[in-house]
Amino acid sequence: MFMSSAVESLTLDSGPIIPNVPLVSFLEQLQETALKTFGSKDFDPKLYVDLSLKFDLSDTQSAFDKLSQNGSVSAQDLNGFIQRYLNTAEADLETVSPVDFLANPDGFLPMVENKQVMEWGLKIHGLWKHLSRKVSDDVLRKPQLHTLLPLPGHLVIPGSRFREIYYWDSYWVIRGLLASKMYETAKGIVMNLISLLETYGHVLNGTRVYYTNRSQPPLLSSMVYDVYIRTNDKEFLKKALPALIKEHNFWNSGIHVVTVEDEKGCSHTLSRYYAMWNEPRPESSTIDRETASKLSSVSEKRLLYREIASTAETGWDFSSRWMRDESDLTTLATTSILPVDLNAFILKMELDISVLAKENGDRETSLQYLKASQVRKLAMNSIFWNEEKGQWFDYWLDGKSSLQGYKWKSSQQNMKAFASNFIPLWIEPFHSDAAMAAKVIKSLKDSGLVCASGIATTLTNSGQQWDFPNGWAPLQHMIVEGLLKMGTKEAMSLAQDIAHGWLKTNYVTFKNTGVMHEKYNVETCGESGGGGEYNPQTGFGWSNGVVLSFLEELGWPKDLKI
């Protein structure tokens, strides 16, 4: 099944040149030197490409060259250089108080009756103050000294090493902000992302210059839709709608789209992840080079670098889901996969645009995108849906370099259990299909993914962070919300079990550690997740948002012990 080679464009260009290339190149040199000097223990390469310069690059580079001219640098000398010539990674952003933050907002978490749980909810709500930032004036005045990109408004960061906005994180941050009644802050995040789209042609993975070569799961329309439903802000909608259409074009043109002919001879166009980059990621340059060192040729390494960057674009970096050999990261083949969840997100984008265009008085656009959603639903059911298994499965392409001419084969469906197989439940055309939904519920129950403390990402314990036993807030939220929208007794019961297990492990872990975590171990209540290429992070934007969203909609049941 997985013998095909990665689908690769006919050229090996690295795509659009990232801004501030000389600065990024210098910081990568610094990253490499720091690894040699300080060693690999607790080494985070991202830290070094997030530093900003105190002086012009030419002066800084000259001083660095003198420092390292004999090939090695002592820890004392390197620390001295960094202190003299560079600002800390935090210096680019200033902590600000959100304009719409209230310590105890009116109508906050109306479903929560338990006093201890309400106190916890208010503590999470209070974290928005600690995660709120604005870009420093120095970034705006001297952007050539910084890898942080300027933004027009205030932002909310995920936390810890993630000191900037991240694309798909922002959707669940916004869901939490809406539960906290912080509508202006939520709208500001959306407008920041729209500014990136208008500048670069797509919403970036994150707001650093080294993220301009890729996007992330496209949830901008979901942000606009949810904010609009809460605020009914027509002016906000009018500003946002053209950007959503532009993003739809990005994911439905060029290298992102692939055509597959089904068993009946009908052609279907679906989308894939594909980063415009075939070099090491600057924020993980030392890690990527080490991974690629197992390969012999330059062309093989370039192919791998593109797959690594494309996997980062999925948001699932990294997971056995994208590998031919789940124990070997060099077998990443993300560009050879048509992902279920990406196409579900684009289908939702089409539905969102249809509804929002109608709200904006544009009936023609509304009908156009409604028809597009119907075409994509048919494509998803033709290529991804497996009637026998009751799931949607990723589809693996064979090794052609063209973007069309593929003929559907059942053997190309990846029939392993991933949480992403159930993401279509989140989208209206699927959770409203009663017969299909009943099959999916049974399949989810039997999949082995539903654990005591939430839904596991996969069943493979590879050591990668988007694998077992880790559970992630976005996946819990989308699947639970999809089940709730079905409205059947069985679906509601399963949704509540998953959500309450997730809430309990978040609560217990918070009580034990005093912080919210990026991911959790769904096998063990009260344990944060691990694995991956960096240490587990705290803060934490989307975990906060999902907890507040669950508490707002479901509350805390009286029989769920604390």
Image (tube, rainbow, N blue to C red):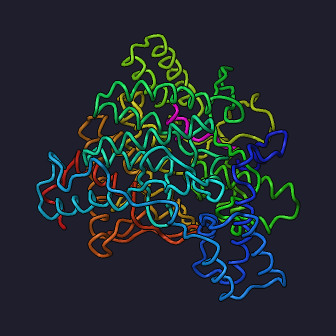
Front-most of residues 425 and 59 = 59
Hey, which residue is sitting farthest right in the picture? 297
Residue 345: horizontal and vertical position, in percent? 50, 36
Q: Which residues are magenta?
A: 336-346
Front-most of residues 360 and 274 = 360
Task: State the quadrant of the C terminus.
Answer: bottom left
492, above or below 65, in the image: above
Q: Residue at x 73, y 49 (%)?
A: 277
Residue 254: horizontal and vertical position, in percent? 71, 31
Q: Quadrant of residue 412?
A: top right
537, above or below 553, in the image: below
Relative placement, left or right, of 4 versus 163 is: right
Q: Is any atom of residue 340 visible in this view? A: no
Task: Verify whether residue 369 appears in magenta.
Answer: no
41, above or below 191, in the image: below
Residue 20: horizontal and vertical position, in percent? 70, 53
The main secondary structure of the magenta stretch is helix
538, above or below 479, in the image: below
Q: Residue at x 36, y 19 (%)?
A: 359
Q: Residue at x 65, y 89 (%)?
A: 76
Front-most of residues 518 and 294 = 518
Q: Quadrant of residue 460?
A: bottom right
Q: Is any atom of residue 479 visible in this view? A: yes
Q: Quadrant of residue 238?
A: top left
Q: Residue at x 78, y 85 (%)?
A: 72
Front-most of residues 84 and 108 = 84
Count of labels in the image: 0
Residue 84: horizontal and vertical position, in percent? 63, 77
